[in-house]
Image (cartoon, rainbow, N blue to C red):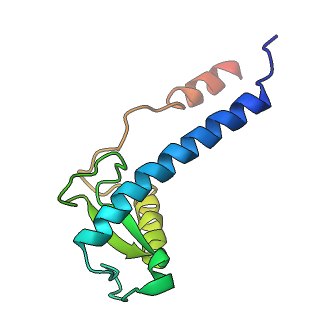
C-alpha cells in the first residue's frame, strides 16, 4: 500500500513554487512596464497609479519561460482582456477541425473501445 503524502512537505513545495513564480513574474513584469506604455494592447485602456496592478503581461507564445530582453514575446493586457485571451485559446483547443486540418494530438485513448465492447457481448 502506498504511503500517504506528507502534507507539510507538499505545502513547502507549493510555497516554494509560488515564490519562484512570483519572483520570475516580478522580473519580467517590471521590464515589460519599462518597455511598453501602460496601455492594454487589446482594449486600449490606459493605466496609472494604483490601477497599474490591473495591467498584466501576456506571453504571446504561451511560454512563461520565454522572456526575451526586448519583450518580443510580451504584450500588456488588462485583467479582462488577459482572461479573455486565455479563454479564447481554450475555446479554440476544443473546437472541431475543418477539412484538411490535422488533430492537435494523435493519441486516441478510446480508439479500440467499440471493438472491445462488441467483443464482450
Q: Is residue 25 above or below residue 16?
A: below
Judge left or right: residue 76 versus residue 5: left
Q: Position of residue 117 (x, y in %)?
A: 65, 26
Residue 94 location (% of width, % of height): 46, 56
| Image position, residue 104 (x, y; %) | 35, 44
Residue 115 visible in the current orientation? yes
Closest to the observer, 92 or 64: 64
* Quadrant of the rendering where the C terminus is positioned: top right
Give me the residue at 37% from left, 34% from top: 106
Can residue 95 be seen here? Answer: no
Q: Quadrant of residue 7?
A: top right
Check the image and report above or below for 77 versus 3: below
Q: Position of residue 83 (x, y in %)?
A: 48, 70
Q: Residue at x 28, y 62 (%)?
A: 74
Q: Is residue 117 left or right of residue 76?
A: right
Q: How many marks?
A: 0
> Farthest residue toward the bottom?
45
Q: Is residue 104 above or below residue 98?
A: above
Q: Quadrant of residue 113?
A: top right
- Name the residue nearer the viewer: 44 or 88: 44
- Quadrant containing the N terminus in the rendered view: top right
Q: Residue at x 28, y 45 (%)?
A: 102
Amino acid at each position: 500500500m502506498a504511503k500517504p503524502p506528507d502534507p507539510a512537505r507538499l505545502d513547502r513545495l507549493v510555497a516554494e513554487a509560488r515564490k519562484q513564480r512570483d519572483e520570475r513574474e516580478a522580473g519580467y513584469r517590471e521590464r515589460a512596464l519599462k518597455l511598453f506604455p501602460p496601455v492594454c494592447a487589446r482594449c486600449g485602456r490606459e493605466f496609472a497609479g494604483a490601477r497599474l496592478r490591473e495591467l498584466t503581461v501576456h506571453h504571446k507564445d504561451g511560454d512563461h519561460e520565454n522572456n526575451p530582453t526586448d519583450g518580443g514575446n510580451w504584450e500588456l493586457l488588462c485583467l479582462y482582456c488577459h482572461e479573455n485571451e486565455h479563454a479564447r485559446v481554450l475555446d479554440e483547443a476544443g473546437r472541431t477541425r475543418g477539412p484538411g486540418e490535422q488533430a492537435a494530438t494523435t493519441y486516441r485513448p478510446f480508439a479500440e473501445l467499440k471493438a472491445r465492447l462488441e467483443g464482450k457481448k
